[in-house]
Image: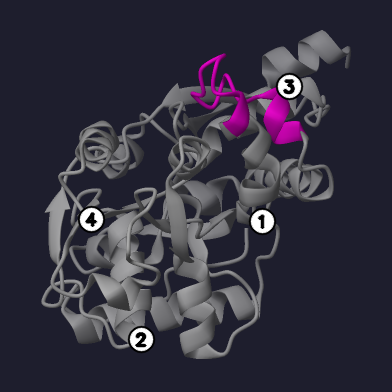
Amino acid sequence: MPLRQAMAAAPAVRITLPAPGSAGSAWQPLIDQLKLNADPGLVLDWVVADPGKMQTQLTAGALDIGVFGATGLAALANRGSDIVLFGPALNNHGRWLVPAHSPYQKPRDLLGKTIASTAETSETYQQARIAASLSGIDLKKDVKVIFGSPTANLALFERGDVDAIITLEPTASRLVGRGAVEIARVADIWKQATGLTDDPILVGLAANRSWLDANRETAAKVVALFKRVNGAIQERPQLLATVSAQMGLKADETRAAALLPARLAPAYATAWDEQVFGTIDKQVDVAAKLGIIERIPAGKLYRQA
């Protein structure tokens, strides 16, 4: 069958298109730039998917594949959702930052202070809370947290209305490029508390079990593609500098763009194995103990494609 006919015959996979300002926004431009998808049987239809609406989009069939973190997915599973993780996407790349010349040098210095973070239900905050709790810091009791959108939090931080911010890349590199000081990585707090050597998963590829059962070969191809693009970034971190504009950095943010390769490349995950599954189980277990979720779901949240 000619290539054009094969592509026309292949049903498009509606996959989440992360918005600029997120690490995932590098996927589509790099897959295209590096020509990583040469399979005529895998046609991707990138769909803008609001994380707050992704579960609805998946359930309604408007989206085939999204990304989810363990704690958010566990909460959905407890309400009857059949969405499941089936491949790697991003490792945790959350950062604790303080303004230039701040006296605070580590998270424990911020006890009793005010920090900004994304929504309380966001994976960014929930995993930061989980990691902090393992090191003896309760973000619900020991600090005052102001929850807001990334844009609002950025404004609070730069005005000096908060003592610190917990944020993801590329926003963290943008702030460091402007003089902010990074005092901790959420992944490092997790590793120090658990003794594990790898950065924990932030989000994985996710789909409804029914879609996965009906599209096993396609799902496996998507996993292989994401391993290729994430592996390429790990091997050649400078690729991130070539798509900094697509990731939301402005033309004059040259310092932030230069920081991205070293700071962000480790976030692109390629592993999907028992060690990753153990991390997911640990995240869910701690989330249940902290009351972030009502209980540990009865079934596993993950599977091989």
Q: Helix, strand, or loop for circle 1? A: helix
Q: Is residue 62 above or below residue 204?
A: above
Residue 299 in view here: no
Secondary structure, mark 2, is helix
Callout in the foreground (4, 2): 4
Labels 4 and 2 touching (C-beta < 8 A): no
Query: Which quadrant would residue 260 be assigned to in this image?
Result: top right
Position of residue 183 measured from the top left corner of the image (x, y, whole percent): 44, 64
Query: For residue 167: magenta?
Result: no
Task: Report if the CB atoms under discs 4 and 3 are less than 8 Å apart.
Answer: no
Q: Looking at numbered disc 3 in the image, what kind of residue is underneath it?
A: Asp
Nearer the camera: disc 2 or disc 3: 2
The image position of residue 35, as x and y in percent, is 82, 24
**Residue 192 picture location, percent across and down:** 52, 85
Q: Earlier in the sequence, mark 4 or mark 3?
A: 3
Looking at the rendered structure, the secondary structure element under dot 3 is helix
Name the side, left or right, on which 240 lies relative to 155.
right
* Main SS, magenta residues: loop
Residue at 25% across / 60% down in the picture?
76
Q: Nearer the viewer, residue 260 or 273?
A: 260
**Mark 2 — residue?**
134
In the image, is residue 284 above or below residue 202? below
Residues in magenta, as a range = 239-255
Instruction: State the image quarter where residue 303 is shown.
Output: bottom right
Label 4 amino acid? Asp
Q: CA distance from mark 2 to mark 1?
A: 22 Å
Residue to which mark 1 is pinned: 266
Residue under the image location 25 percent in, 52 percent down: 117
**In the rendered image, which quarter contains the C terminus?**
bottom right
Residue that appears at 78% across and 11% down:
5
Residue density around tag 1, few if under 14, some if 14–19, many if 20 or more, within 10 Å: many
| Residue identifier under label 3 | 32
